[in-house]
Each structure stands twice: as C-alpha cells, then as structure tokens.
Amino acid sequence: MILRFGGPRAGNYLMSAGIEQNTLSRVSETPPQTIAPQSIFESYSVDNEVNRLRAESELSPAERTFYLKENLLSYFEEFAAQIKVKKLSGHVRPDGSLYMQGTNVSDMYKRSALMQGQNSREWYEMQGMETILASLSSGEQDRAVWFSAPKIADYGFAFYFAADDYIHELGGRPIREMAIRYDDQLDSGGKTRYLYNSIQDTLCPNNPHLQANSYEDYLLNPLLFRNSQDAENLLFKHIGIDAADVQFSEQFRSELLPLVKEWVNEYTHIVERLRDSGLSPGDDYYDMLKTQAELYFGAMFNTAEVVSRRMQSKNDEKDNAYYDMMRKVDLTDSRLTQEVAQWMWGYQNVHTAIKNGSSCPSIESWNPIGQTNDSFISQMSSGGSLTDSMELSMSSIGKKDKNKLHCTCPWCNKKVWAEIKNKKITCPKCKVSGTYNC
C-alpha cells in the first residue's frame, strides 16, 4: 500500500471543526533548550519490536499483541504524558497462574518455596500470592494490596495489583503491579501496622479483621477489594504518597485507548507481518511496512500528547478541535483509518516531539515492559524471593533512599540493592554485612 498524505474525508472533519488544512503542516518553532528536541524514533524502534517478537517465539499471537500494546502505552505514558511509573505487566489465567511474556511465574515462586521449605519467607510469599491470584482470576476482586514489612532498613513496600476484564484471546485477565515504598521503623513496624489496619477498615470492612504483627501475617493476608472511584484515592491517601502519577496513568490510558484502538490494531498487525516476513531493514517490502507502522505510531503519539494536554488543562483550541474530530471519526472505516492517521502524523513534527530529550541513551535500550519484566524474571530465576524480585525490578513510587547500592553481593553472588548504613553495607538476600568506606 502506498502512503498518501492528505485527503478529502479527514479534511471535511477538520474543516467542520474550523481548522484550515494549510495549518496542519505548521510546526511552531521550539525555543532554545539545554537538551535539543529529539525524534520519537530516537527512543522507539519498530525494528526492536520486530526483533523482540522473533526472539520470544514461545509467545502466543494473543500474548504478542498484548505486550506490543503494553509497550506502546508505556511509551506514550513516559514521553507524551511524562508519567514516570514503572510496572510489571502480565496476565492471570483462570487457574490462578501468572504469566509474563510466556513465562509461568507461578511455577518459579512455587519452586523457590519448595527449595526453601515450609515456614520460610518464600513459603509465606507463595501462600499470599496464591490468595491474590485466586481472587483476581475468579473476578471476585480486581484490586489487591500486599505489604512487605521492613526487613533490613527503615522502610517497607506495599505492592499494588490491578486486574482488567478477562480477554478471551489472551486466555486471562491483564494484570499490572506497582511497588509503593513508605518509611517505617525496622524495630517497631508501627507504620506498616497502621497502614494495614487503616486500609483494611476502609476498603475491606466486610473481611474478618486481622491484627497483623509479623511479616508472616502481612505476607499471608493480602488486602483484596473491588476498585471504585474513591478506592484508589483512599488507598494512596492512607499510604501518604503523592500518587498523582499512578492515577493519571490509569486515567490517561482510559482516555487514550478508545481514540487510537484501531491504530493499535493496525500497528500490531504490521509488526506481526514484519516478524513473519523473515526480512531485514533495507528490503523494499520490509521498509514499506515499517514506514506504515511508523505512520500509525506517530499518529498515536500526537494523539496521546493532545489527550495529556487536555487532562492537564494545557490544551488550546486546535487541541480541542482535533480531540473532537478523533471522538467523532469512525476509524473502523478502512477508508479513514490511514487517512486520519496521516492528519494526526502532521499535527506536530514527530521528529522534534521529545522536547526534554529521552531518558534512555538509545533506542536499543528502550523497552519498558520488556526490561521490567525481564529484570523480574531474571531475579526469580536466580533464586530471588518474590517480593525482593518485585522490589528490584520496578522503580518504586514514593520516597527514594540514597543509601543504597545496586551491586553483586560478594557473599551470595546475587544482584541486589544493598543497604548502606553506619559505614556498613548489608545484602538483603543473605543478610550478611561488611564494612563500607566509599
């Protein structure tokens, strides 16, 4: 298919909105900045997506589509909406098993629990995770909070799980996990106890009341509830963090997806064709399909920026007109799918769209869902506990502690975030400490 720029049908929508067609090609001059504006294709590569799908041959077609979609949304969250929340992403099947990129994570943490034995931390983690997944997979609840009390330093973690509706083609419910860090005293654990009881009383009032006192109590008894308009606000208010990014992320997705759904479908279909072609960049057919994929990607990015600006009340009349057009146009009409994408591609210059530079050094390294999931699976494969692996793989929300060092422990040879305190460095995995004078 040959790409055509412009066309009467999409133009009619814009003219009715009061926008002249000759304004579409205008790109406002960008004021001088410390970091030069970058193209969206300096931080995102269709080739990378194709190569990743080829490498992960064990994924089903539905799983490939799911992870392509998640990667798109994560990119738009970070670069269009400036949301800096990292997540683990997977799906839970009806039997309660958790899968991430074709890997049965449930088998991994069950194996760890078996190796460490009954009454080990890994055993309690397995029991708690089984409770969460059983509830989310059945549809009984769609949200969970799981507390990991302080282990070797003055902070704990609340792991937040959100499940979406069941997708037949995927064979499960999409699930997202986030790590929320909060301050607490290692010796007393009073903040963890307060948070657990407060959230239990507020969001789970019908559950049997538990007086949790030990880390085993918290791991064995996650808090399960159904989401509502106020549930997440109450949850984050109790934890005492600025969770605007989390809430904005969820709202941003719900606003954006209906507008770009057909483009997501077209994009994933093209990437699948590239994967199956066996061809490489430089081949005429490969390059033609890649150009089409980039067209849809650019159109989605520009739409994402319009949605983000509207949500932050930073929009102008032109944004409003394009947003109204996107809500009215029927992109399921194959005659309009590509034509409107061409209009949205031209809405702003995608080659100077990243105004503050990319937070990633090159397109080779950007793959948020892949990298976060890969890190988690790698930690689990190397014998890490479930909660430790979740903490290490995600950029946690909340207060950061500068007194940590990402390193390979010389005693247990595991990659960990070691704790530095009073000139001592402690491994969270094997609990061995040593002198630290750096």
Image: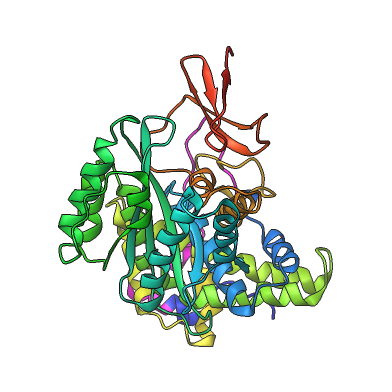
Residue at 53% in and 84% down? 169
Residue 50 falls within the magenta-colored stretch: no
The residue closer to the viewer here, 128 or 79, is: 128
Residue 423 showing in the rendered view? yes
Q: Is residue 234 left or right of residue 347?
A: left
Name above or below for residue 225 compared with residue 261: above
- Residue 313 location, x and y as percent? 27, 52
Q: Position of residue 187 (x, y in %)?
A: 32, 29
Q: What residue sits 64% from the left and 32% below the top?
A: 409
Residue at 76% in and 68% down: 287
**Magenta residues?**
12-39
Identify the residue at the far top of this view.
437
Q: What colour scheme has been applied to the protein in the rendered image? A: rainbow
**Res. 398 image quadrant:** top left
Q: Quadrant of residue 252?
A: bottom left
Q: Magenta span: helix, strand or loop, mainly?
A: loop
Count of numbered marks: 0
Q: Is residue 345 visible?
A: no
**Residue 282 falls left or right of residue 224:** right
* Magenta span contains residue 38: yes
Quarter the N terminus occupies: bottom right
The percent position of residue 24, horizontal first and vertical second, equals 47, 62
- Which residue occupies the extreme front position in the image? 118
Residue 327 in percent (x, y) is at 35, 75
Q: Nearer the viewer, residue 366 or 120?
A: 120
Screen quadrant of the C terminus:
top right
With 301 as the anchor, is 289 left or right in this view?
right
Q: Is residue 321 above or below residue 309?
A: below
